[in-house]
């Protein structure tokens, strides 16, 4: 059954089904109507009005701030939890928050055709990235782990171009490459230039997270961003609940202020609230532009590392920060 595309629809908030063949499944009609309504409710396409673009940039920036606390909070959590327990328990807690919101608001399940995309989001940002980075942070400093985030914006923009056919300008790509190079050079210098076994975990985390961001940004054009991550978290419950039980039974647990605070933040802040505003921002300003805001994330993480973990920065930090801000400004103004 073909329905009118919500991307080209007029002011109406529902999709006309007058041309549907007799006996067409009612669920398909309801799914199309729900998608159109989501668009009409304000899921802006990239290149929309300046007001929507400004709000989208603000929301994506709030997501970056939330994500910048993930590595320090994970380091705190590892003071009292094993890596497997920390990852599985944070996912279960975030899923309970998201599932509660979905139940209270009586949100119907997504259309069947969207579940494959939600599975990619779940594999990338609910399971893959948290698990791989947590395993890496057992032996790596947060400064060294920040190299993942330094390459994540460029990787996300590349996957977006492949998956969704986005075509940013040459100016955008040049600024993105320059920003990634500045962040990588700084983080490698900050960690002494040494490569460790944790790097395999970090590079794997880079790829799965970029895939999850790309697919989540695509789905956030169809449904609200909080529902994207909410359903992805709920989808993982059959895996994360038994994993949490096994991990808690086999790994030592030591409840401290740091470990509990770290767990609560990575569950509620990084795993749910941060992704809610992040996906909404991506839907408003486009995946490539939103991804480049993450160039500032490693530098923010290093600031938190100094304040919360007592790590030390080199004098190159403010110079790198200035270079990154220039690159971000260029990518936000570049076409595409």
Image (tube, rainbow, N blue to C red):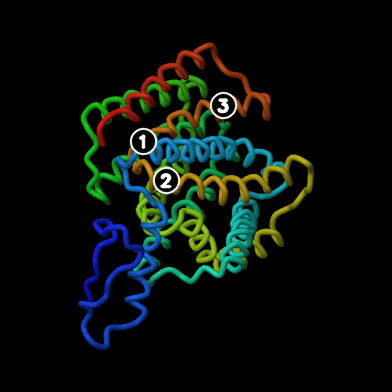
Tell me which numbered mark, 3 or 1, is placed earlier along the sequence: 1
Q: Which mark is residue 149?
A: none
Question: For the point 68% across and 48% down, which residue is it?
Answer: 264
Q: Position of residue 243 (x, y in %)?
A: 60, 63
Name the residue that disc number 1 marks.
Answer: 50
Describe residue 170's horizontal placement relative to residue 11 as left or right.
Answer: left
How far is disc 3 from disc 2 in space, using C-alphas?
21 Å
Tell me which numbered mark, 1 or 2, is placed earlier along the sequence: 1
Name the residue that disc number 2 marks.
Answer: 204
Describe residue 80's horizontal placement relative to residue 10 as left or right.
Answer: right
Q: Position of residue 250 (x, y in %)?
A: 69, 59
How far is disc 1 from disc 2 in space, using C-alphas?
36 Å
Question: For the point 33% across and 69% down, which residue is it?
Answer: 32
Q: Residues within 10 Å of mark 3 (few under 14, many from 20)?
A: many
Q: Position of residue 178 (x, y in %)?
A: 33, 23
Q: Quadrant of the C terminus?
A: top left
How far is disc 3 from disc 1 in space, using C-alphas?
32 Å
Q: Nearer the viewer, mark 1 or mark 2?
A: 1
Check the image and report above or below for 28 versus 171: below
Q: Quadrant of the N terminus?
A: bottom left
Name the residue that disc number 3 marks.
Answer: 302
């Amino acid at each position: 059954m073909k329905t009118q595309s919500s991307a080209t629809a007029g002011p109406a908030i529902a999709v006309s089904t007058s041309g549907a063949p007799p006996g067409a499944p009612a669920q398909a009609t309801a799914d199309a109507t729900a998608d159109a309504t989501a668009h009409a409710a304000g899921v802006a396409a990239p290149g929309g009005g300046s007001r929507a673009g400004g709000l989208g940039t603000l929301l994506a920036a709030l997501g970056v701030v939330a994500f910048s606390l993930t590595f320090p909070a994970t380091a705190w959590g590892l003071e009292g939890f094993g890596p497997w327990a920390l990852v599985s328990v944070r996912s279960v807690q975030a899923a309970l928050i998201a599932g509660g919101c979905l139940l209270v608001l009586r949100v119907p399940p997504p259309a069947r055709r969207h579940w494959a995309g939600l599975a990619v989001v779940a594999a990338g940002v609910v399971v893959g990235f948290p698990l791989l980075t947590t395993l890496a942070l057992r032996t790596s400093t947060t400064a060294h782990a920040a190299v993942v985030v330094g390459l994540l914006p460029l990787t996300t923009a590349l996957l977006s171009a492949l998956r969704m056919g986005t075509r940013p300008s040459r100016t955008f790509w040049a600024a993105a490459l320059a920003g990634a190079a500045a962040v990588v050079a700084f983080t490698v210098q900050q960690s002494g230039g040494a490569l460790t076994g944790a790097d395999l975990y970090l590079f794997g985390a880079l790829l799965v997270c970029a895939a999850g961001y790309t697919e989540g940004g695509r789905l956030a054009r169809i449904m609200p961003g909080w529902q994207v991550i909410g359903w992805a978290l709920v989808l993982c419950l059959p895996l994360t609940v038994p994993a949490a039980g096994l991990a808690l039974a086999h790994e030592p647990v030591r409840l401290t202020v740091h470990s509990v605070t770290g767990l609560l933040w990575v569950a509620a802040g990084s795993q749910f609230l941060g992704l809610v505003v992040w996906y909404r921002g991506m839907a408003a300003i486009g995946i490539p532009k939103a991804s480049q805001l993450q160039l500032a994330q490693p530098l923010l993480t290093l600031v938190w590392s100094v304040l919360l973990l007592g790590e030390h920065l080199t004098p190159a930090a403010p110079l790198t920060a200035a270079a990154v801000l220039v690159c971000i400004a260029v990518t936000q103004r570049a076409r595409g």
